[in-house]
Image: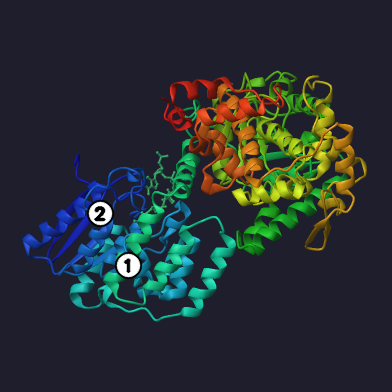
């Protein structure tokens, strides 16, 4: 069992159990067995009248050890350990610091009292991993906090601050101090009778059928694709009955969720968001960023400024005109007010952030900033002009970044005498909300500059993914490819609404035509025009219908008309669309045919997977999981599917190659089997293998 993760200390008439399993005291088998052994050791000693259980390091148990999932279960299991704690004769008080999550909170609820330090948080986030609290959480939480609180805790997965946990009844007291000291004092108070103890399982839950009914209807509506939220509600409903029966019911539901593809997808996403931080430049020391300059007060520039201000960084916003500046400052102010409304920041923090904003039309005012982010119009000439100017103005060691979504970062860097200080920082709109940040590494970008991009992302609570230089980097390059499939499907017979509904059925929050209308069809129009000169002659053009919409001035929501018509909150059919589609099909000599929803999804996903495989093949993405995280945190890819390449493994390379070869009968230029996929089909490997470096 390796080195001891759990130790016992006897202090007069109490005993202390300390768990020490860095980094987050996950309750792997060594911790579970260690707790059981500790209780036996204390029993054998016979001197303790109360026990304090606490953790060393930065947090209380942050859950079951997720790395054990999917492997043969190791005994004792966590449900058993929680029951052993509860049945223990000598009362146990758990002391919570950091985050007691999932199996961690369940362990604490198995104890006979809970004391938290003021900064502690508790939660049951299992639903975010496609499972449910499987060590008694759905039975003990309602007994301590009531059905409504338990449903909130279990379905939101949120981390509840100590004072709210106290109000809910999840913890019994809040004490200041180091965990060991608090545990000792609390155990003493148990002996003295000033801290009450009880067995949670002996408590009863007051039925609340209305809450159960309303919540079940809500999760079925909000999470139509997911199985675990509904099972969570069923388990909480069972908590009004016999405790042991409730535990058995919970276990059965848990075992239905754990092997599900959804849970595998969500667990892949959890570890993926951590794996992408593993970059070649990981050991480089980031440069200190204490001030930021943002060039451009448009949607992106304002969003980026807002995101920086929300971290406490001072921002200097540059615009060419006072009018543009005023518009930028107004947008930033609106973003910050919105953040206050959403409870993301207090009014005081909002005021402090706004006080940290300087607006100027003088680029020279960026002479001393540590980082400049250019977010102007997507035109290479304009970007080159700006970087030439920044090169002359900015201090040595300043990091110069472009928020370009597509353009060649090396070409931009080459306009300066310091290409090693230049990189792409590709934010996603709205930049103060979207999690993803593509850190685009140029040929000459210095390792510490890349590390600076990742450090900034962490500070902004974003997920950074390292991308190489090509047209559109990771996300937009792949998007550009699979959106062609959407346009071909419409040209060949599917209706835009059917395509959207089929992909929403797959799990996307919104189909490509509605997303296009939301983002603005003019963006796609300009990209098609920009690429027209370099479009291969043999490439089938799918943009004719979308071009007609834009040429009619119908660019989506911002013009209240695009693929659909928008009246207030209503999305209606565009009465002019079908005629345009018919005309363009006729012009292209297409005899339309029917597509099933399944075929629409297969073609769309196969196109996405194909280009994603090429992005990995070309080294633009470090690993397949990097592509997955880009799509999960920047393109609304359904999280329970784990990302395009995790999903690809559920199909298998052989089947994907067969599909592409079949589709290539229609269009051999567009449907080409990526070399990586062909190799995987031949050697039976998977993207998961590649993630493991196999
Ligand atoms: N198991 C294994 N490894 C874990 C882990 C866990 N539960 N939690 C974190 N890690 C690793 C993580 O991969 C990373 O590794 C390192 O710890 C630091 O994490 C029966 C079955 C606790 C809030 O869902 O939300 O209990 O990348 O980078 O930002 O009902 O980690 O360094 O190699 O995230 O400070 C329920 C999951 C499990 C909580 C800390 N628990 N963890 O955040 O650090 S299911 C959870 C978190 C369960 C029972 C069921 C966060 C954190 P590496 P980090 P952080």
Percent across and percent down for residue 457 are 58, 40
Front residue (pair 653, 91): 653
Check the image and name the residue furthest to the right.
Answer: 552
Which structural element holds mark 1? Answer: strand
Task: Give the labeled residue for mark 2.
Answer: 77
State the image quarter where residue 169 is shown: bottom left
Callout in the foreground (1, 2): 2
- Asked if residue 694 shows in the view, the reply is yes
Report the coloring of the rendering: rainbow
Identify the residue at horizontal 59%, vertical 45% (top origin): 460
Label 1 and label 2: CA atoms lie apart by 25 Å
Which structural element holds mark 2? Answer: loop
Q: Is residue 677 above or below residue 175?
A: above
Percent across and percent down for residue 619 are 57, 23
Percent across and percent down for residue 297 are 79, 44
In the image: residue 468, left or right of residue 374:
left
Task: Give the labeled residue for mark 1.
Answer: 115
Front residue (pair 78, 613): 613
In the image: residue 206, left or right of residue 52:
right
In the image: residue 374, left or right of residue 47:
right
Q: Residue 279 got which mark?
A: none
Work out whether mark 1 precedes mark 2 in sequence or the reverse, and give the earlier one. Answer: 2
Percent across and percent down for residue 501 are 68, 51
Placement of the C terminus among the 4 image quadrants = top left
Placement of the N terminus among the 4 image quadrants = top left
The response on whether ligand 1 sits within 8 Å of label 1 is no
Identify the residue at horizontal 79%, vertical 35% (top origin): 363
Front residue (pair 117, 550): 550
- Asked if residue 554 shows in the view, the reply is no
Asked whether the residues under the numbered discs 1 and 2 touch, taking CB atoms below 8 Å apart as contact, a structural biologist would say no
Q: Residues within 10 Å of mark 1 (few under 14, many from 20)?
A: many
């Amino acid at each position: 069992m390796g080195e001891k993760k759990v130790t016992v200390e006897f202090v007069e008439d109490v005993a202390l159990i300390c768990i020490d399993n860095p980094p987050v005291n996950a309750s792997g088998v060594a911790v579970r067995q260690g707790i059981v052994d500790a209780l036996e050791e204390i029993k054998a000693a016979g001197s303790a009248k109360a026990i304090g259980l606490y953790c060393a390091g930065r947090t209380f148990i942050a859950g079951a050890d997720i790395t054990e999932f999917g492997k043969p279960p190791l005994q004792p299991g966590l449900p058993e350990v929680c029951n052993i704690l509860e049945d223990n004769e000598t009362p146990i008080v758990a002391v919570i610091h950091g985050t007691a999550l999932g199996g961690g909170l369940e362990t604490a609820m198995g104890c006979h009292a809970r004391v938290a330090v003021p900064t502690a948080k508790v939660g049951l986030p299992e639903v975010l991993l496609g499972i449910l609290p499987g060590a008694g959480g759905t039975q003990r939480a309602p007994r301590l906090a009531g059905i409504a609180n338990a449903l909130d805790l279990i379905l939101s997965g949120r981390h509840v601050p100590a004072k709210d946990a106290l109000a809910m009844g999840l913890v019994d007291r809040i004490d200041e101090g180091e965990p060991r000291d608090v545990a000792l004092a609390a155990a003493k108070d148990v002996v003295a009778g000033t801290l009450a103890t009880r067995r949670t399982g002996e408590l009863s839950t007051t039925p609340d059928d209305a809450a159960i009914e309303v919540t079940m209807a809500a999760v079925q509506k909000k999470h139509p694709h997911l199985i675990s939220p509904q099972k969570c509600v069923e388990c909480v409903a069972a908590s009004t009955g016999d405790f042991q029966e409730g535990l058995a019911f919970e276990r059965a539901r848990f075992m239905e969720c754990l092997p599900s593809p959804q849970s595998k997808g969500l667990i892949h996403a959890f570890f993926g968001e951590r794996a992408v931080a593993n970059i070649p430049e990981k050991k480089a020391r980031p440069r200190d960023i204490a001030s930021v300059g943002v060039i451009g007060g448009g949607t992106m520039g304002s969003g980026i400024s807002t995101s920086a201000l929300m971290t406490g960084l001072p921002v200097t916003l540059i615009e060419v005109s006072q009018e543009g500046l005023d518009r930028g400052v107004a947008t930033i102010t609106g973003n910050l007010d919105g953040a206050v409304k959403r409870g993301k920041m207090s009014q005081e923090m909002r005021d402090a952030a706004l006080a940290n904003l300087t607006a100027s039309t003088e680029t020279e005012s960026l002479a001393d900033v540590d980082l400049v982010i250019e977010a102007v119009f997507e035109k290479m000439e304009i970007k080159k002009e700006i970087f030439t100017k920044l090169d002359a103005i900015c201090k040595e060691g300043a990091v110069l970044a472009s928020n370009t979504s597509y353009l060649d970062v090396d070409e931009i860097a080459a306009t300066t005498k310091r290409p090693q200080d230049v990189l792409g920082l590709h934010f996603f709109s709205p930049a103060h909300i979207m999690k993803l940040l593509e850190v685009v590494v140029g040929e000459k970008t210095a390792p510490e500059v890349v590390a600076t991009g990742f450090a900034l992302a962490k500070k902004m609570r974003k997920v950074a993914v390292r991308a190489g230089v090509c047209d559109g980097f990771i996300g937009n390059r792949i998007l550009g490819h699979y959106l062609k499939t959407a346009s071909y499907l419409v040209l060949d017979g599917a209706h835009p609404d059917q395509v959207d509904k089929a992909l929403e059925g797959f799990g996307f929050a919104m189909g490509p035509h509605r997303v296009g209308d939301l983002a603005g069809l003019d963006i796609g129009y300009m990209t098609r025009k920009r690429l027209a000169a370099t479009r291969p002659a043999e490439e089938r053009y799918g943009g004719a219908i979308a071009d007609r919409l834009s040429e009619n001035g119908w660019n989506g929501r911002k013009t209240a008309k695009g693929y659909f018509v928008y009246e207030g909150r209503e999305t209606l059919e565009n009465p002019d669309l079908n005629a345009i589609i018919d005309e363009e099909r006729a012009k292209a000599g297409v005899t339309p045919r029917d597509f099933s929803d399944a075929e629409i999804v297969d073609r769309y996903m196969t196109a996405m997977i194909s280009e994603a495989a090429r992005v990995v093949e070309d080294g633009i993405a470090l690993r397949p999981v990097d592509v997955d995280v880009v799509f999960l945190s920047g393109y609304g890819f359904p999280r329970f599917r784990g990302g395009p390449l995790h999903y690809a493994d559920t199909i298998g390379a052989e089947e994907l190659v067969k599909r592409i070869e079949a589709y290539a009968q229609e269009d051999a230029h567009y449907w080409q089997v990526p070399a990586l996929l062909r190799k995987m089909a031949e050697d039976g490997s998977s993207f998961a293998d590649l993630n493991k470096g196999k």
